[in-house]
Image: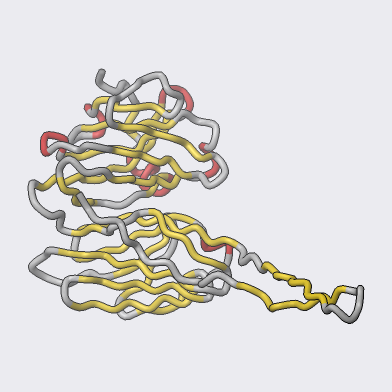
Amino acid sequence: MICDRIYLMALGAQDVRTVSQVSVQERSSIIIPCWYNHAYVNNVKYLSSGDRWTFSKYVEFSDGREKHETVCVSDNKTTNILTIKMRNIQQSQSGTYWCGIDGPKRSHIGVGFKLKVTAVTAGLYVRDQMLAGFEAGSVTVSCYYHLPKKTGIQWCKLGGACVLESGGLLDGALVEIRNGNGVVSVNMSRLKKEHTGWYWCSVRDLQMPVHITVSTREETTITTFTSTHKTTSSQSTSTGTIKPTGSFTSAQTPR
């Protein structure tokens, strides 16, 4: 079905944001997040496909009216993120897609991204798009690339600011970027819970989204009890506090 909408692309470029181009190997999966302005939290969101926005075709809706076999769209109204999950991607699915919002009086806003499906290893990929870290700790993201030129390297918060090579501060977190041997390594430290969210690494004209979840450290005290044959009382001894590590690195092998 072709979308019947009023063209509001200029407004959509400000109120809906996502990556501009991603590369993925066929038969694998990818998650594409789209940030939107909170003013549209109660509007229906959707994914459409086609080179031109006005003539694109609906793929999937956030209200479940369509059921695509390999594409799932979900709307998190707390974070204002429309999440698009695509699995078992085929080369025939290469093309331009649109994160759209059904606006008032049949007006729509949206922003597009290009999906390039390759038969061999993707131009830019991560082994795991979902990572985790702890408050006051750090997290490391490894972005692997197969591109002729290593330009345009940056690390960005979806809907927010960017840090260029070789690093800097991003919303109070310290970002260090290292590049070499086909890998852009991004380390975020001084993490806080509010740093939870979607980010993306960029090399040249490709981006790859990564979600980071920052949790509170849990401290567990282990107490042991010892007794002697000379007395009938028990003695309590604290063995200290166990703290989990603060760094996680992506580890899933790409398909």
Q: How is the image coloured?
A: secondary structure
Q: Position of residue 18 (x, y in %)?
A: 35, 49
* Residue name at image x 70 percent, y 78 percent: 239
* Residue name at image x 58 percent, y 69 percent: 135
**Residue 101 sits above or below residue 128 on the image:** above
Residue 194, located in which quarter of the rendered image? bottom right
* Residue name at image x 27 percent, y 59 percent: 126
65 or 25, which lies in front? Answer: 25
4 or 18, which lies in front? Answer: 18
Residue 248, located in which quarter of the rendered image? bottom left
**Residue 33 sits above or below residue 123 on the image:** above
**Residue 126 sits above or below residue 170 on the image:** above
What is the total number of numbered labels drawn onto the structure image?
Answer: 0
* Residue name at image x 48 percent, y 56 percent: 197
Q: Position of residue 158 (x, y in %)?
A: 41, 56
Give the side of residue 4 with respect to residue 232, left or right. Answer: left
Q: Position of residue 138 (x, y in %)?
A: 47, 73
**Residue at the limit of the structure toward the front, as seen here:** 229
Quarter holding the N terminus is top left
Q: Position of residue 100 (x, y in %)?
A: 37, 35
